[in-house]
Amino acid sequence: MAAGKGTRMKSTLPKVLHRLGGRSLLQHVLDAAAGLGDKRTVVIVGHGAEAVTAAVGAAATCVLQQPQLGTGHAVQQAVPALDDANATTLILNGDVPLIRTETAAALAAACGGQRLALLTISLPDPTGYGRIVRDGDMVQGIVEHKDATPAQRGITEVYTGMMAAPTAALKRWVAALKNENAQREYYLTDIVAMAVADGVPVVASPAPDETEVLGVNSPLQLADLERRFQRRQAETLMEAGVRLADPARFDQRGTLACGSDVEIDVNCIFEGRVELGDGARIGANCVIRDARIAAGAVIHPFTHIEGASVGAGALVGPFARLRPGAVLGAEVHIGNFVEVKNSTLADGAKANHLAYLGDATVGERVNYGAGSITANYDGANKHRTVIGADVHVGSNCVLVAPVAIGAGATIGGGSTITKDVAPGSLAVGRGRQAAIADWSRPKKAPKG
Ligand code: UD1
Ligand code: MG
């Protein structure tokens, strides 16, 4: 179910498209469902239907609920897309993102195409939730908070919004729903009393953990679930041996594959697909997206890496920026305020201070001086700079691409290099120093 408005988010984005851990709320639910066996997935869309349908893509069939007249009405729109034969229909909520596949599978198994299975939880403050009404041990029905008597409001066992039902019976039940209640809505929860009347067994299975059944209705709840989700991921990593300086200050918004003895300091953000090799160390406050960091590499604090790969034993940062297409070999050093884009640096190359390398091919052991840049863009096109092995580029040089520096060449500090440089040669491209002896500086006129 993903048709609701999400008024309390106070956002133009449909609620189920808000992101948690780098994926939409709805995607979390679809991913949990993807782990179930033979199935068909139907997403009920309504509010922001176009955007939600586009986000679902080929992952599921979308059915439109317009207008939104309640959860029972929502399921009425979906049932024509479901097969009856011995099947179980599992109903999940697009705004309850942290449900685990195992819990969903257990709920479906509790139904087994025969029983109505409800996922429940006991809450110290059940305000707002549908209460599980029992007669002795037997579930008799669910009463919504707004329709509940004071005595029923005292019940702490609540319906989480997730259930599994025999499909053929579900179709019959939802077709018979009425909206005679406090909210003038078609309540899906009314099918529980129908099941009881039909003699279909109703089983209430308790949720294994509160986090799995918490919904997102407000930015506050979204942030709370984000921290719970990050804690889950942090624990998985730490159980595998990753050393997080503080699991409360760690954010993984995608997949993070770590070798052994990886250390991650506080406030790092990992996005997309990131791999950290054995012994890699990530300093505080780094943002790393879609990157591979090889064994033994050290990323110093405040470094930003995207779409790049860092070789074994390389040192990067602090305050470095690796942009897409940066490929660093083994033992490369990239120091503070160095930006690298679409460039390959072979093993042992160094750019330690305040430099830019864009569209460059840099040979082994090159030393690239402080303040030097590749002028790779002529205003219309990008051009390559090729720097051979063992080249020494002095400080504050401008290498105007396209240009090639032969192996072992030296570029004098402050040079602007516009022509290719032969291997082993020295190239200096700047004004010669002039000397005027006994120079007297201009003096200020006396005041008054
Ligand atoms: C529902 C349950 C309540 C349960 C609570 C758990 C009903 C009648 N009540 O109440 O027993 O304790 O969830 O959170 O089912 N939706 C649609 N179309 C609609 C209405 C809702 O798709 O017309 C979707 C919403 O987007 C949401 C879900 O259904 O994902 C639940 O709707 P919501 O309005 O939050 O139901 P509650 O009143 O909280
Ligand atoms: Mg709700």
Image (cartoon, rainbow, N blue to C red):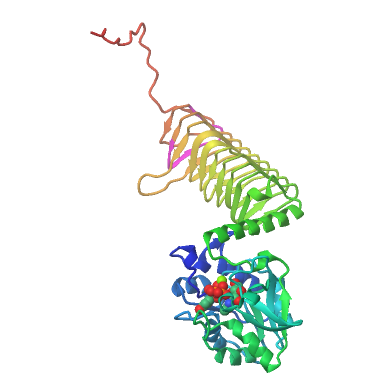
Q: Nearer the viewer, residue 103 or 131?
A: 131
Q: Is residue 1 visible?
A: no
Residue 419: give x, y in percent of width and height: 42, 36
Residue 431: give x, y in percent of width and height: 38, 23
Q: Nearer the viewer, residue 438 or 245?
A: 245
Residue 93 appears left or right of 294: left
Residue 14: give x, y in percent of width and height: 48, 68
When asked about the image quadrant of residue 127, the answer is: bottom right
**Residue range (magenta):** 399-412
Residue lying farthest to the front in this orientation:
150
Rendered position, 1 above or below 369: below
Of the four image quadrants, the one with ligand 1 is bottom right
Residue 272 appears left or right of 441: right
Residue 220 appears left or right of 87: left
When asked about the image quadrant of residue 367, the answer is: top right
Please report the residue visible at 56 percent of the width from the left and 82 percent of the height from the top.
Answer: 187
Rendered position, 17 above or below 340: below
Q: Does the segment drawn in magenta span residue 235?
A: no
Q: The C terminus lies in which quarter of the figure?
A: top left
Q: Nearer the viewer, residue 86 or 95?
A: 95
